[in-house]
Amino acid sequence: MKVKVKVWRQKNASDKGGFKEYEVLTDPDSSFLEMIDVLNQDLLNKKEDPVAFDHDCREGICGACSMYINGQPHGPSKGTTTCQLHMRSFKDGDSITIEPWRAAAFPVIKDLVVDRTAFDRIIQAGGYISVNTGVTVDANAVPIEKEKADEAFKAAACIGCGACVAACKNASAMLFVSAKVSHLALLPQGAPEADIRAAKMLGQMDKEGFGSCTNTQACEAMCPKEISITHIARLNRQFFKSGFTASDQS
Amino acid sequence: MSWISSVLGSSIGKKLLMALSGLFICFFLVIHLTGNLQLLAGDGGQSFNEYAKLMTSNPLIKFVSIGTYLVFLLHIIDGLMLVFANKKARPVKYAVGAKKGSSISSRNMGILGSIILVFLVIHLYNFWFAYKFGSVPTVDYGHGPVKNLYAVVALAFANPLYVILYVLSMVAIGFHLLHGFASAFQTLGLNHAKYNGIIRFAGIAYSILIPLGFAIIPIYFYLVLA
């Protein structure tokens, strides 16, 4: 099959950038990233600069790939990352527009690669737990009820790809922050820092320049791990609890 | 005090103020509609005019109305602040806009709110300002003169342009509420499988019935009474 791809090309962070169109001959069973690989091989053969894009595991769990394809982060398949998207989701002769994540907090480094270290700083602000050193604790020493463990696991499925930010009309990172806060809030291991976690992580999110949540639910619809906005409600509750009751607030 | 400004000044804090002020306005709209429906009483405006007199002379109601003005102001200013901050969060727009995954009203709350704000200014000028500071004819029902706001309303609703503006504004309010009502509960952290369905149903029912109730009045005045 043959597709027309319109790709965002930008030499570096300070370059203005613009779209460039290419024709790619690809197989319906190849993944979207393999289609870009073919394009890049063509460009290399022509001694042109290949398209820079993030990728790592290519099996949907690392959160590295990050393309905004035809108006949707990670493309048209529900609950999939770009690497798990296949060319059979498109028709022969289709035009495909590929853009980088667009957010003030995710500046473009080159072409389709954006700087997502803002997420790391949010995690550093409070997305951790205190663990005692010493002997290894028995795996089942702390009882956790099944429903809570399941809910925490669903939040922990977040791979931090930033699709929620890309999908949100406000470029808000609330779904990401909520997944991390919710994951730890549901488990007893997260209890020691529970009073300050939400406020610290949200404070960092605001500082990074992400927008605020307007509950459009676009993040939930576009999340490759289908993280639910119920976690955002839990983040809000955790934030009110830390904001209005935590003892460290002066 | 610093903790108050840091909590309420944060993105969730600003949303909390939006949700609380929004729900207060939802409550206000029910009271407002209950009062307005007296326009349809068919008594030449007596009950409506006496009600308007009570609403502007009772000290307790006057106190609450000052609070209502402040809540409206808070909702407008906080909303505008959020809209501008959110615009700044995405300086470079996408070439292909997102159309899936969210409702039209949820994506256009700022625009809908601005339409409602324009309507609110015109609406307050026509009725509230006229009643408080303008010259309104009086009518006597046997216990002293009462301002005849009914006559002002009847005159305004005889103008087809005003009726159209009013009805279209009610449509905008309906769409604003369609997202806003349920969204307020989500912001407050009230999201649970046990009652999400109730909130969604109440939100849809509220955002259809309340604007419809308001819109019936000018349509009735224009088509039946005029």
Image (cartoon, coloured by chain):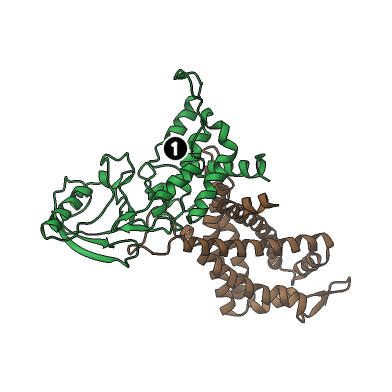
Q: Residues within 10 Å of mark 1 (few under 14, many from 20)?
A: many
**What residue occupies the far front of the structure in this picture?**
A134
- In this rendering, position of residue B74 left or right of residue B143: left
Q: Which chain is green?
A: A
* As drawn, A151 above or below B98: above
Q: Position of residue B17 (x, y in %)?
A: 63, 55
Residue at the image point whose x is 56% and y is 79% from the top: B161
Q: Position of residue A28 (x, y in %)?
A: 16, 48
Residue in the foreground of this view, choosing between A13 and B79: A13
| Residue A188 appears in view | yes
Q: Residue furthest right?
A: B143
* Whether residue A125 is situated above or below residue B96 in the rendered picture: above
For residue B149, side relative to residue A204 (left or right): right
| Chain to which mark 1 belongs | A
Q: Label 1 is placed on what type of residue? A: Ala
Residue annotated with mark 1: A155
| Residue under the point 60% across and 75% down | B222
Where does residue A112 sit, x and y in percent of width and height?
29, 56
Q: Quadrant of residue B21?
A: bottom right
Colour brown maps to chain: B
Residue A14's place in the image compared with A199, above or below, is below
The secondary element bearing badge 1 is classed as helix
Which residue occupies the foreground of this view, A48 or A36?
A48
> Residue B94, percent across and down?
35, 62
> Which of the 4 image quadrants contains residue B46?
bottom right
Please name the residue shown 39% across and 44% down the image. Answer: A160
